Amino acid sequence: MFRNQYDTDVTTWSPTGRLFQVEYAMEAVKQGSAAIGLRSRSHVVLASVNKAQSELSSHQRKIFKVDDHIGVAIAGLTADGRVLSRYMRSESINHSFTYESPLPVGRLVVRLADKAQVCTQRSWKRPYGVGLLVGGLDESGAHLYYNCPSGNYFEYQAFAIGSRSQAAKTYLERRFESFNESSREDLIKDAILAIRETLQGETLKSSLCTVSVLGIDEPFHSLDQESIQKVIDTFEKVPEEEEDGGEGEAEAEAEAAAAAPAEQGGAGDQDVAPMEM
């Protein structure tokens, strides 16, 4: 994208009907670290890539807890995501205090979208440069929503946002039909495999990703690195075992081939001393 006379103000329309400042905010989401969400009938899994600015710094959090039944993963400007997650947490607490019941996920998503939309109609504000994957569980079941900087929101079975998310989307599109009936462990495994698709050849380790899960009778929480590494080991070591098995079969065939001539010659030369090599 290039600067033009219609992108100096978020409220200025271009002749083609575009708001460039909003599009720039959506572009910021594409530049952020990848975030992935999946849901089944009873569980929601959120995952994100941990990227540090340098080897001397730690990574910034990309997954936030809103309530026991709601969590959010972000991609884009982390500061904006932190502010919006705090707003969501406040809305959830106020609803619980007033009505003594958990806030429905869809209602919270609408409030979040309205807050983002206001920033596209005020010349003294700018759009939030962050995309949010909101996962939650309420009386109507598990939900996964994507909130866009433009104020739009969409519900998904599985979705990925952020840098190199198209590779993860391709993986999810091949597998999404089975997600509705997937178990908790299968959802976690698919989320980690989708994260691996975004790394483009980089070795997947537990330190490179964060995985959080919520479900029926399971409050929202993040998995520890040991649990994530165990899941990674289940599919990272399979090719090595297959290679080892292939080498073992080749060695067995070679030994069998070497033993066959020896057995044939041994019948007539049983009393002959073996030759020294």
Image: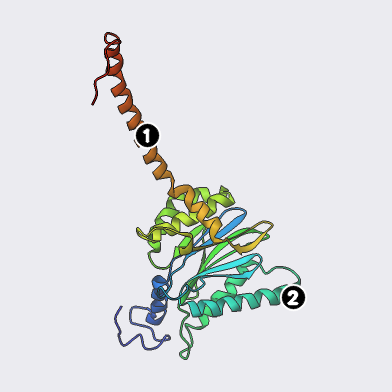
Disc with the residue nearer the chain's start (2 vs 1): 2
Which residue type does callout 2 highlight? Phe
Residue 78 horizontal/vertical position (percent):
48, 77
Residue 267: which quarter of the image? top left
Residue 98: which quarter of the image? bottom right
Q: Can residue 121 be seen here?
A: yes
The image's mark for residue 97 is 2
Residue 7 horizontal/vertical position (percent):
35, 85
Seen in the picture, residue 114 relative to 216 is either above or below; the reply is below
Quadrant in which the C terminus appears: top left
- Considering every residue shown, the one lying at the far top of the view is 268
User: Decide: marks 2, 1 in contact (CB < 8 A)?
Assistant: no
Seen in the picture, residue 129 relative to 216 is either above or below; the reply is below
Quadrant in which the N terminus appears: bottom left
Left or right of 49 on screen, residue 109: right
Q: Residue at x 50, y 80 (%)?
A: 79
**Colouring rule applied to residues:** rainbow
The image's mark for residue 143 is none
Residue hosting label 1: 248
Residue 104 horizontal/vertical position (percent):
65, 67
Q: Can residue 189 be seen here?
A: no
Query: Gap between marks 2 and 1, in whole Å?
Result: 65 Å
Residue 183 horizontal/vertical position (percent):
58, 49
Single out the mark in the foreground, 2 or 1: 1
Query: How many dots with numbers?
Result: 2
Q: Nearer the viewer, residue 85 or 193?
A: 193
Q: Secondary structure at mark 2?
A: helix
Q: Residue at x 60, y 53 (%)?
A: 41
Which residue type does callout 1 highlight? Gly
